[in-house]
Image (cartoon, coloured by chain):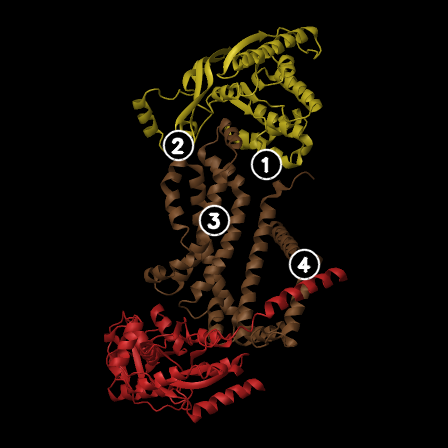
Amino acid sequence: MTNTRGTIRVVLRELGYFFKGAALNIFSWEFLTVLIPLVALWELLPQLGVVPRTLIPPPSDVIVTAWDLFVHQGFIHDIINSMGKFFLGLGIAIVTAIPLGILMGWNIAIRKRTLSLFQLLAPIPPPAWVPITIILFGIGLPMQTFLIFIGAFYPILFNTYQAVKDTDSRYLASARMFGASEFTLIVRVYFWHALGALIMSVKTGVAMGLVMLVIAEMYGGRTGIGFVLNEAKDYFQIPKMMVCMITLGGIGWFLIEVLKFIELKLAVWKGGAR
Amino acid sequence: MVKQLLASTLVLVVALTACGSDTVGTSTSEGAPLTVGTGGGYLSATLYAADEALAAQGTPIDLQEFRSHADVGYALLSNTVDVGFVEAEKLAALAALDGFEQLTVAGKVTYPYGATVVVRKDLDVRLQELDGLVIAASAPTCKLLDRFAEDAERLGASLDHVTYEYLTFDAMLPALEAGVIDAAVIKGSYMSLALHEGHTVLYQSWDVEPGDECCPAIIDQAELVLLVQRDREDAAQPLLEALDATQKLSPDELRQAVVTSTTLSFDTLQGQPVPEFSRADDELVALFVEAAEDHDD
Amino acid sequence: MIEAHNVTKFFSVVNEDRTADGATALLSVSLTIEDGTIVSLLGPSGCGKSTFLEILGGLQEPTEGCVYIDGKTVLEPLPATRREMIRYRRRHWFLSPLANSLFRNRPKHDIAMIFQDYAVFPWMTVLQNVTFALKLRGVKRGERKRIAREYLRKVGLADSLRKYPSQLSGGMRQRLALARALSVQPRIILMDEPFAAVDALTRERLQDDLLRLWDETGITIVLVTHDTDEALYLSDEVVIFSPSPGVVRNRFSVDLARPRRRTDPELLVLKERITSLFRYDIIHESEYSI
């Protein structure tokens, strides 16, 4: 009982640290000196008629539209729907690309049999997968998930592989001298040595996954941020488009902050002398 | 702090005005071929025919196909094209945007509304077996749906257990493809696309009187409207004349023009009504002016 | 007892124009190291002494010859004929014999190794570094922490158990490596220039620590160094390597009782003899090059 309470307290404390850190990043004085003028200009230029207000709606218009979208049009369901697909695709990419990358970095026999294949497939821009994906999976969740997966897969795979391959041979030799099995080496040495690059690769994966989310939602399905964005474009609703864009940006920013926080927690040992 | 704020504001102002001065875009110079934007497809049949005729006359136009007719709207606003076809139902939305005041309406493409029921390609059902399936319609009270329901009843098909899904016409075919719906009540102009994607037409009737929310009578079955940049009205005259001339073409000649310019096959188009081009009548101009005035308020 | 018989190591290199080339790192090195002694392998860089140490520890195969520890082979040399090589490749297509078991690569000879750049795992705390080594050696869970604490106390790291290596100084990191190597109670410790990366004062303290721990445990220490003073101060025997190809040039016994003084005249005499050997090398080389 006290244990669970203790865990909850720790979780709450860590959450507090996270939000404080994230808020400090975006509301730092240095960044505010850029953000405030930017938003002010964005508000003023359309208001003063320097740029056409209907084509570049100022933040005040966008906020009104956002309120309407969230309160009356159930935009939150679109966000949840999109995030569901996104995390499914990204999750599958993480649980496949990281082990595969580790195996490829660890063993030359595996690397020789797989690397060329992935090097051939990786340069194919993810959007080019759309037609064949539609043929294979039809239009719907599997196809959308697959597209997000394919966007995030290669950056994670190659960064993981490279980082594992570059593991300092001294660490391996010293673990081997103590009798480490290859499995122990993978779990206790290769993985940890590659951790920083691994989280970096997931950050790239998040960015690519968001790109593919929007593309995937242009095809099939009638919910999701990408769908709303595209529909708003087709019906000349520019403020609505901007709400979608800002939402996507915000989601990306938030996820990167989460990853930065995880990195900080997992890599305390990189802290340097204190 | 204040200094920093001022400095970055100044930088931004300079940067933005530098970009802003370019946004208006430059009008195409005289003598250059007329650029025409369209979303393509069967509805552009008259445009394809006119394009061929003008090329034969030695005054070719620069035909630019966009992914959708909405994109043509943006191209018109930004003065990328001189002339363009935009969906009639989106005219009001387009009128709300800046840049619309430099446009004028010149004509329209009409196509019979027609009540058409298409069934997903992997389903093999007859009219009597529709009961219990999911059917998309554009609104609960829609002439197309009424027409269909009436005929279905007459033919002894029951629709009591049908689940209706209300979607825009644009969304129906993707939803059909995705398997979200089993069948859709579409208007005539979407039929060629449905056939092209491989769905089967179960029911069709061209005997529909327009006059409600999903088939507004005011623009009298106009699918597309032709918008022209005001300063290019003279240059657009040959195109308009060529489009007028398509009225004299036989339906098969128009279909052939579509087959030449797109990937649609002649068989798909056979037996379907053809789109017609006509000059903007008073009704359409009135609608246009109304939309433009809304914008000015 | 460590016995090296005619150990030869040949590295093949592929040049930029795709022609094969090679370098002989070690040529027919034979050496016997008695139990419980400290032996230094001394020589300029590139003389193959580190390669020799790795062959002793089983981190590299010899091209020819063999190393025996208490009569048991450390690693078979690579096959000499083309035919045998093909069979060898087929047998080890998935993993090289250096990592020859997927699940256990149990230490055969009770050796521990200390590297120049410590090779302590930066993602583990001081304590975890030692308990991890103990775990790999099959020490029971309950015992690990106790043993680890004991050895960390011996090297003076008792107060830094929860710190990470990045929070330690170079000298402390080397102490950690020492504690980790000793904690598994090996019979042989191989050290590859262990004190090269720390400042002179720390180095002397670490050398004294090493001697004290050696005195307590009586293990065999093989030490690679390029520091003549260090070799003479620590060792029972100094083996001089000379480069291209790496061969054993000379062997000096240091029959001085411990504790030694660094300024002992006998050591200085030995040092002068060793230095003159290297000096001769340089003259020798320049004669050829002219």
Q: Label 3, on which residue?
A: A156
Residue A31, label in figure:
4
Q: Residue at x 38, y 75 (%)?
A: B61
Q: Label 2, on which residue?
A: C95
Residue C122, label in figure:
1
Indicate left or right for A14 with C54 as reference.
right
Sequence-wise, the earlier of marks 2 and 1 is 2
| Whether residue C163 is visible | no
Q: Label 3 lies in what chain?
A: A
Image hue for chain C: yellow
For label 2, the SS is loop
Disc 4 marks a residue whose amino acid type is Phe
Q: Label 4 lies in what chain?
A: A
Q: Residue at x 43, y 63 (%)?
A: A216
Disc 3 marks a residue whose amino acid type is Ile
Disc 1 marks a residue whose amino acid type is Pro
